[in-house]
Amino acid sequence: MDDRDRYYNQLLFRMEQLLHHELSDCASWKTELIGTDFIQTQDIQGNNEQEVIEACIAKLKAAGLAEDIAWKIGGKGILLTLRVAGCPHMLKERLLRESGIKPYSCLAANMILDQLIERLGYATTYLADLKIDEEKGECVIRAAIYATPDKIGEVSDWSKE
Amino acid sequence: MPDILDVIVSRKSIRRYKPDPVADELIDKVLEAARWAPTGENYQPWRFIVVRDQETRDRIADLARLGSGSRMTAWYCMGHMQERFAGIDDPVKREKVLRFMYSGEVSAFAKDAPVVIAVIGTLMEGSVDVPYDLSAAIENICLEAHSLGLGACWVHGPVASTRDAKKFKEILGIPTGLGQYKVIAYVSIGWPAEARKHPRPKKPLEELVYWERFGNKERPRHG
């Protein structure tokens, strides 16, 4: 990581640290638009989940914002699991964790969720969980995606997914 | 001066309301209480939007259902909600409560409250302490409503996420720029259709208060 990337990650870390200090765990509810300005300029095309998600991943990889992103949908269609490898923001997550704050904002996930809303008209989404594996250099994100309001309440056991 | 503690202690968040209308005079008193809340630099950033229109309240309720339900469905799927409500022994009752929560219905009561007051704050240049000032105003609203025999509930969840806050602003015609107005919550108000049967357990002061320095629980003698 060069000095410029380190600098940008340190900026993001401080911003997220301060936001968490102000809002506690509600901070994660406020950061859903972070990163979306980029993906909204990328002319993502797609008529279904697979096409939109794959198009986002291709753009993210091409821009060097992830080395790879594996994904799957389960949990009655509302659980989107993303496995993001080689994210340039891993330093930000590590700094947060070292300061005692559980990482709570994934920019790659924000972008993909944003395009499900913008391109497919999804009712809403929610980034539910973010786990960092520094050894493997990857993050695992679990997000709830609701194509329509009536998908709210479609519960299942995500630990079995 | 009478002690306000009785009003404070007996207040409860009311989420079920009778359909009976609430007179303008009472709403005016509630708003007057809000106006007298403490505010940094006397900035008074608060603005209040009083909503009685059923269609608008329905839209707010739908937004609330979507916001709370989207989060609580995920929390249930991860097992968090079951842990939170493990104290309910009856499994049938527990599941009923959980379904009420993760369906989002728990937050959809704006449709039944005769009055909803949206509390927003100007973020224009010179603003300070806006969220804190607004919170103080909301507390005054809740206490004054209670003292008048009304029920009220401070509702933040439906405007908690950035996207939902924007939708809420659009419903009420509030400028949506993030540098203009902050929508912090709304308060639903009406005549209570539920009584306070079981005061929520509160932590004892001994657990909450330190003396002179953080962590010191031993009260010093004085005088």
Image (cartoon, coloured by chain):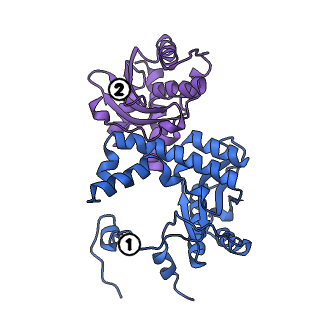
Chain colours: A purple, B blue
Q: Which mark is residue A139?
A: 2
Which of the image's four quarters has the C terminus of chain B?
bottom left
Residue B1 location in percent, x, y? 57, 89
For the question of whether residue B86 can be seen, the reply is no
Vertical relation: B52 (above or below) A54: below
Q: Are marks 2 and 1 on the same chain?
A: no
Q: At 72% across and 44% down in the image, what residue appears?
A: B175
Whether pointer 2 and pointer 1 mark residues with C-beta atoms closer than 8 Å, the reply is: no
Instruction: Looking at the picture, tell me which residue is in the foreground, B41 or A107.
Output: A107
Using residue B128 as the reference point, say whether residue A113 is left or right of it.
left
Decide if residue B96 is in sight here: yes
Residue A131 vs residue A29: left or right? left
Image spot of residue A11 (x, y percent): 49, 33
Task: Please tell me whether mark 2 sits on a helix, a strand or a loop.
Answer: strand
Label 2 – label 1 distance at C-alpha: 44 Å
**Mark 1 belongs to chain:** B
Identify the mark at residue B198; answer none if there is no mark. 1
In this rendering, position of residue B77 left or right of residue A111: left
Measured from the top left, where is residue B71 in percent x and y? 45, 43
- Count up the numbered dots: 2
As displayed, is residue A126 above or below residue B151? above
Callout 2, which amino acid?
Answer: Cys
Secondary structure of the residue carrying numbered label 1: loop
Q: Of circles 2 and 1, which is in front?
A: 1
In the rendered image of this protein, does residue B78 appear above or below residue B204?
Answer: above
In the rendering, at what x and y percent does residue A134 appear? 29, 26
Residue type at tag 1: His
How many C-alpha atoms fall within 10 Å of the one at disc 2: few (<14), some, or many (≥20)? many
The subunit carrying tag 2 is A
Q: Residue at left 49%, top 16%?
A: A60
Choose between A79 and B160: the one closer to the eye: A79
Q: Is residue A156 above or below residue B121?
A: above
